[in-house]
Image (spheres, grey):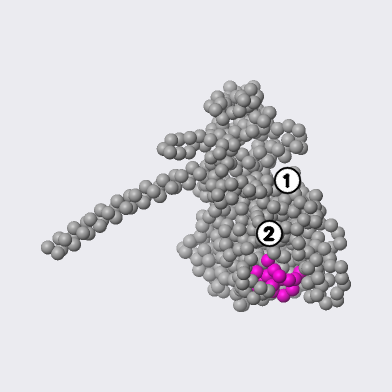
Amino acid sequence: MNKSKEAGITLISLVITIIVLMILTFSITTNLKNNADLQKLVNLRGDIENLTQKVNDFYDEYGEIPASIEYTNISHLSDVLNSVEKVTKFYVIDLQAMQGVSLHYGKDYEIVKNIDPERTTISANDYEDIYIINEQTHNIFYVQGISVQEDKKTKKYYYTDHEKVENIAGTNVANPPEMLEGMQKAMFIEPTNTAKGKVVLQNEEGFDESQWYSYETKKWANAQTKDGSMWVWIPRFAYKIETDPSYTEGKTTTGGTIKVKFLIGTTDNYYDDDGSLKTAQRQKSNVEIINSNKEYTVHPAFTNESAISYANGGWDKELSGIWVAKFEAGYSTEEDITSNADPVFQGLKYSMNNVSQQEAFNISKALVEENNKYGLSKETTDSHLMKNSEWGAVAYLSQSQYGLDGQNISDNYVSLQSINNPINDKQQGINSIYGITGVTSGEANVKNLIVTTMEDIDNVRMNLPNQEGVYTWHQQNGQSASTTGTIHGIYDLSGGLNELVSACVSDEESTKYIKAYKKANTDLEDENKMQQANYSENTQIYGDAVFETSTKGTENSGWYQDASRFIGKTALYMLRGGSISESSNENGLYAFNSTDGNSAYNIGFRAVLVAK
């Protein structure tokens, strides 16, 4: 009797469990469907905002819209066209005229652009996965439209003036990457406990556009140039800093909180958490002081600051984002070291050291020169030595909810055993220590420098370190050295080599390539006192992860107790990130130091690419 009763209870429980699971499954499926539809609308908005900005730039420069192929298959759009648009013409947007634009939709343009009306009966009107523009209003429409499920009905959206698309509550979408000539999209098969991560390029089997990037899940967009170098897209954003209340000069191992809002196109606008449209602040005059603790501030790395003498390290036009080298500059082989070959920006390479400030600047500019190995074009791409403002943009996005989210980044505190390095005359025939790109011990503030060999690195299996305790960038434990804690981020920013950035103390004015910090109006013999004097002279500058994340220009007053040694009397150039030659507590995303600009074995660099 007891056994039958127990069996009955068990059966009832099982039935209830099954019903509950069915309800949960239905709910989850419904939510996933809604999220997928929401993402479609977000993608449409991003495409049209991106195209609108590109079209406006083209029109400002040439006085006409970038379009010549007329499109008349618009009868199904009649309900969404205004009275002017119903009597004027539409044209297919010429995406080739706006090189670098990257879209979620509009793939049929690749077919339409090659149609010769004199040789075929096919016309542009036979295709719908395409963007068109009104010749008079310049409004842009997606002909095929986006179908979404609302209240058990299917609705279509063709443009972004609709309330549903414009006010997507709580969404904060990154600008899509601007692909440059010579680049391929690169997605990742992420590492596991039993397998390393892998790169899959857009022309390879297994590439999935939907898995390419998602900043909401800390998957920053990656691309690869012809030589195999990797680049990471940093979208235009605004930020607000909330300093840790316990933070005093070097008394805590934590940092502050940085909140990020991605901006719409090249505007200063963003959607707040309640879906309302807001405008972030920015410096607009040479005397204006910006406080990034009070409200969202457009990061200066993306702004046109030509009118204010590039006060915070801005550019000469508004940018939707920048491409930052995923790894610091390196050599592929020992032979490349001796032949002084052009750098690669790949993982598990010999870090490119013994470069002076001028050499790093020149090498970075030359990445787009004719017949370069990267496949880049000087006509469409600007390459340059990373600026301090751009370092700050990477550091702030990493500190935010889209990156490490307040966790400290792990160190690359790994050196290769001495190899012959005859590059520099001062070190001719002398063995020199080398860093290696894309490696880590898997923790921050490690105590001892790890010395290993390239052979040991190559022999790393699965998710196990080599015999020296080193993890690689494409291992699961190696991801802690990334700005995102995932394989999708940027590496070598803490340790490795001290990285030269395009920053100095000078009486000269800043340019879009070089940030010139003001020199204090004093002449102190003591280097530390001069560092502090120069630091105090520039505290109004924002965005460079110097003055907003440290309290003085000497010692270790930066977030996470990172080194904070500003440019002084004789060392007039800036270094970032620390290196294998310093104790590990000197290293970090917020570490800064100074140098005289001469080459040294512990100094390297990385480059940045910008669409022209």
In front of the other: 467 or 95: 95
Q: Nearer the viewer, residue 468 or 179?
A: 179
Coordinates of residue 60 in the picture (x, y in percent): 75, 37
Confirm whether the magenta stretch covers residue 238: no
Looking at the image, tell me whether mark 1 or mark 2 is earlier in sequence order.
Answer: 2
Check disc 2 and report the residue beneath it.
292
Crowd around label 2: few <14 · some 14–19 · many ≥20 (10 Å): many
Secondary structure of the residue carrying numbered label 1: loop
Let me know if residue 70 appears in the view.
Answer: no
Q: Residue furthest left?
A: 1
Q: Amino acid at mark 2?
A: Ser
* Camera sees residue 523: yes
Residue 554 occupies which quadrant of the picture?
Answer: bottom right
Is residue 415 or residue 295 the one in the foreground?
Answer: 295
Residue 90's quadrant in the figure?
Answer: top right
Residue 76 in the image: state x and y as whole percent: 53, 27
Q: How many marks?
A: 2
Relative placement, left or right, of 549 versus 426 is left
| Residue 553 highlighted magenta (yes or no) | yes
Residue at the spot of label 1: 612
The kind of secondary structure the magenta stretch mainly shows is loop
Q: Quadrant of the N terminus?
A: bottom left
Residue 515, position as x, y percentages in the image: 78, 59
Magenta span of residues? 549-566
Where residue 136 appears, as percent x and y from the top left, is 68, 28
Residue plotted at (76% across, 35% down): 62
